[in-house]
Image (spheres, rainbow, N blue to C red):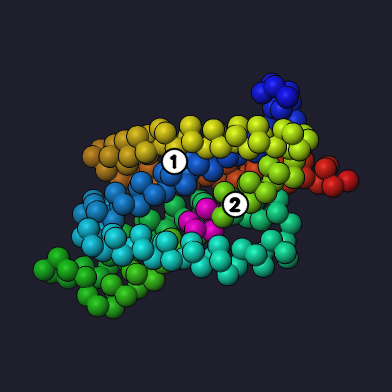
Amino acid sequence: MSLKEILTYPAISALVASGFSLSFVATSFEVVFALFCYSAIQSGGLAFSASKIGWSLSISGGISSALQIFFMPYLLRTFDCAKMYLFSMSVWPFAYLCFPFLNLIARWGLTEDGQLDANTAAILWVGIAIALGLSRIGVLAFSTSMILVREHAPNPGALSQSNGIVQFAMCFARSFAPFLVSSLFALSIDNDLLWGYLWVAVMVCLSTLISIDCRRILLHSKKTIS
């Protein structure tokens, strides 16, 4: 089948658009998380050292591994794949909303010498774990996306083409997402736009619209079943 023929299938075209959007918000989160952690607390960040950022990313990897190994098989046996995909996409706005609250916690516990007290640091790490946990739930959409492509491919012979188109859309979004989101991050902080959190507002609005648009996949999935 040609590219045009494959994209005439509504479910595949919806998965291509959704895969592009998923890759954009997921890659953007990875980029701004590191920038946010490194930025000064007064600038809206956490003023983390490189080692603390490394520990944060290690926590993220651990959460992701646990979800994939221990929870993903059970979830796939229990819930509809399309609904799981929609749920994973719907957590991205909440993941981005965590950033301002993490900075508020850091500001609240900042001592006169510019350090965080022990209680605040503990609360802050719990907040980071929640934010990263939400993002790892959102990343589960990558796995369910591949399953949905397999289920909605026009025919077995077009499976590899369908998967290749979706993966191309994801890679294309990943190619420019770091540039756009890091530029927006710098613009927001340098010009104090929306108290330096314009980038959060933009990403929350964008990820909300994306999660709403993903309902098309659930609709097409129901039509396929019927």
Residue 143: where, in percent of width, then height? 59, 52
Residues in magenta, as a range: 135-139
Residue 64: tell me if it is visible: yes
Question: Few, some or many C-alpha atoms within 10 Å of disc 1 (few <14, some 14-19, many ≥20)?
Answer: some
Residue 90: where, in percent of width, then height? 59, 52
* Whole-number angstrom distance, CA of label 2 to CA of label 1: 26 Å
Helix, strand or loop at label 1? It is: helix
Q: Quadrant of residue 12?
A: top right
Q: Quadrant of residue 131?
A: bottom left
Q: Nearer the viewer, residue 54 or 215?
A: 54
- Judged left or right of residue 187, residue 217 is right
Helix, strand or loop at label 2? It is: helix
Residue tagged 2: 143
Q: Majority secondary structure of the magenta segment?
A: helix
Judge whether residue 136 is colored magenta.
Answer: yes
Q: Identify which amino acid the numbered label 2 is placed on.
A: Ser
Mark drawn on residue 202 = 1
Question: Few, some or many C-alpha atoms within 10 Å of disc 2 (few <14, some 14-19, many ≥20)?
Answer: few
- Judged left or right of residue 131, residue 139 is right
Where's the N terminus, which quadrant? top right
**What residue sits 70% from the left and 37% below the top?**
159
Q: Can you say whether 10 is above or below 96 in the image? A: above
Q: Quadrant of residue 100?
A: bottom left
**What residue sits 21% from the left and 54% below the top?**
40
Q: Identify which amino acid the numbered label 1 is placed on.
A: Val
